[in-house]
Amino acid sequence: MPWRVIRRDDGLTFIEVIVTFMMVSAAIVATTYSLFFGHRELTVDMHKQQILRIVQQETEYWVGRIYVGTPDDPNVIELAGSARTPYRTVMLDPNSESPIQVRLFYDPIITRAGTINPQEEIAPYYVVTVWAEWTEPDGQDFTRNRGNHVSLTTYVRHRVG
């Protein structure tokens, strides 16, 4: 008798078909959403990597200006930084459907005394910080205020001579 309760020969009911269809539909929707979300995150990560390379180039530019420049080069105005307004704008993927405008900023380039410990004599150095802000095509902002921007800080010793 128990075997008769488990085994049925009358086929599938309409409710079983609908429940199965809804479960398969939910799995398809979840998989599709995951693929689109993953693609978007990979695209944002790719943009961050490209922007990091741009920020590295800009940091190297300022380090070069400090090392190679004349006594007044970089001058006082350049050393003041551009923390409020971008000093340069670069287009990322200019040939794409929605190019990204990357705004580059840099903090004031300040000189720090090199003496941390009175017994040690360390040469003074400059602190150079360059960062980038941008908005993704989907409207996601990457700004310094939000803390999700790309930045790079380096320390440059004074030139000798």
Image: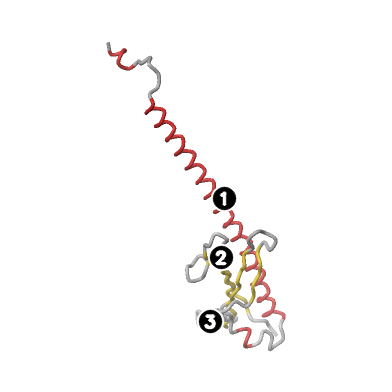
Q: Is residue 36 left or right of residue 71?
A: left
Q: Earlier in the sequence, mark 1 or mark 3?
A: 1
Between marks 2 and 3, how big is the CA–CA gap? Answer: 41 Å
Residue 20 to residue 81: above or below: above
Give the numbered dot on residue 135. Answer: 2
Task: Tell me the element at label 1.
Answer: helix
**Local secondary structure at mark 2:** strand
Most foreground residue, 38 or 78? 38
Residue at 39%, 26% in the rendered image: 14
The color scheme shown is secondary structure
Image height of 118 relative to 33, above or below: below
Q: Are marks 2 and 3 in contact (CB under 8 Å)?
A: no
Closest to the observer, 125 or 115: 125
Tell me the quadrant of the picture where the N terminus can be found: top left
Q: Which residue is mark 3?
A: 115
Mark 1: amino acid? His
The label on residue 39 is 1
Q: Which of the image's four quarters has the C terminus? A: bottom right
Q: Is residue 134 left or right of residue 8?
A: right
Where is residue 2? Give x, y as percent: 28, 13
Question: N-terminal of the two: label 2 or label 3?
Answer: 3
Residue depth check, mark 1 versus mark 3: number of the one nearer the observer: 1
Q: CA distance from mark 2 to mark 1?
A: 17 Å
Q: For the residue carrying disc 2, how many other residues have a C-alpha within 10 Å: few (<14), some (14-19), or many (20+)?
A: some
